Image (cartoon, rainbow, N blue to C red):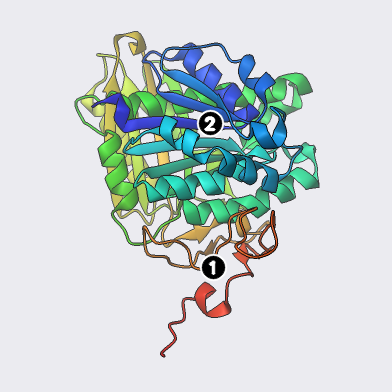
Amino acid sequence: METEDLLLISLGGAAASIVRRMAERATTPLRALILDTDDATLQSITPAVGVSTSVFGAKRLSGRGTGGSHSLGAGAFRDDATQILAQVGTPRLAILLTCCGGGTAGAATTLLEALRTKGIATLVFAVAPFSFEGDDRKRAANVLLPIMETRADALTRISLDALVGEEAATLPAAEAFAHAADRLAAGLGLLWTLVAHPGFIAFDAEHFRAFLTHDVEGGLPFCFADVTVSGENRAKTALNALREDPRFRVNGVDRLANAAQLIVGILAGPDLRLCEIGTVMEGLRAHCQSLKETLLGTADEEAREGSLSVVLFAFGHPLTNVSAAKDGEAPRPLPKRQRGAKAAGTKVLGTAKNRFTDVAPTIYGGQNLDEPTYQRRGIRLTR
């Protein structure tokens, strides 16, 4: 597969740090574009083969950050949209990584809309802030996520708390983000290897694109987790670790056990055995009670001999608005939307088409109240 079919895009300083970690450890070169409004952040990124950086919104922000304002982030993207889209090119699949607590993530909605217009499928990893970062950053993320869900082909919300896990009690605060970033970088690195360099069971960017876009419903939510193990019983060890992974626990719901569709990537060296693939797949099918479809891919590299890595995507069915669910409440259905069509009435942050500028939509319970009720509820009116 040509690597030009796949592009990793990071948005904001925290996401840039994760991509930098990926580039430093990559066994295969990344093709990545790092975007930020803060010039100082990008100056600190070590150049790597295939990785480019770009500052946007310089006229509006003079190379500084957004100060947590989503509308400024969206406006900064509009200022330089042509330049950014030229750098993006025409990949078949774009993986977007952004941390939703800050203001630069406000550009994600306009970026996703532009990518959809170009016919580029989008897989979004939206990182939610630590719980100790306060209600303001949490609210900022909760406003942005429902809009991103309607613009992306697939989106997962990844909690920094879940990435740190049980080690949060022992880690110094300064190391908490570094630990979470390292873990996410490792998982995304496995995903990149799986898609960019598939093994004897192929699963490349075109397979991924077909899966994300074969249905008429857009905004598929999913959960993502990865594990790397070694030893004689490494397949069983990996399976047990995935079953217990906190990243599959969303608002009290075990999204893995309730998954209708799975994408499974198994990465190892030339010592990978068919029985190990069978152990992982049979165990997952037994655990997922509502499973209807499974896609499997493998990748093998000499450097991985002795270890076994599994990358797992769990997609729910029907569509669920995970970001809008409250604690103890099951995820709620998202409104259906024809794929490729603009969500009727949805306003991008800072791009309201009226006499008001830099206006954020009114989001309540995960719904945009600026949309007419009949559109939100899917009621067809006769004329």
Identify the secondary structure beneath mark 2: strand
- Report the front residue among 322 and 293: 322
- Report the front residue among 319 and 363: 363
Q: Which residue is mark 2?
A: 10
Identify the secondary structure beneath mark 1: loop
Q: Which residue is mark 1?
A: 345
Three-letter code for the amino acid on which mark 2 is drawn: Ser
Instruction: Identify which residue is drawn at 60% across, 62% down.
Output: 353
Instruction: Tell whether 157 sits left or right of 131.
Output: left
Three-letter code for the amino acid on which mark 1 is drawn: Gly
Q: Mark 2 or mark 1: which comes first in sequence? A: 2
Residue 270 falls in which quadrant of the image?
top left
- Residue 285 location in percent, x, y? 33, 46
Instruction: Identify which residue is drawn at 42% across, 62% down.
Output: 318
Residue 72 falls in which quadrant of the image?
top right
Q: Is residue 104 above or below residue 348?
A: above
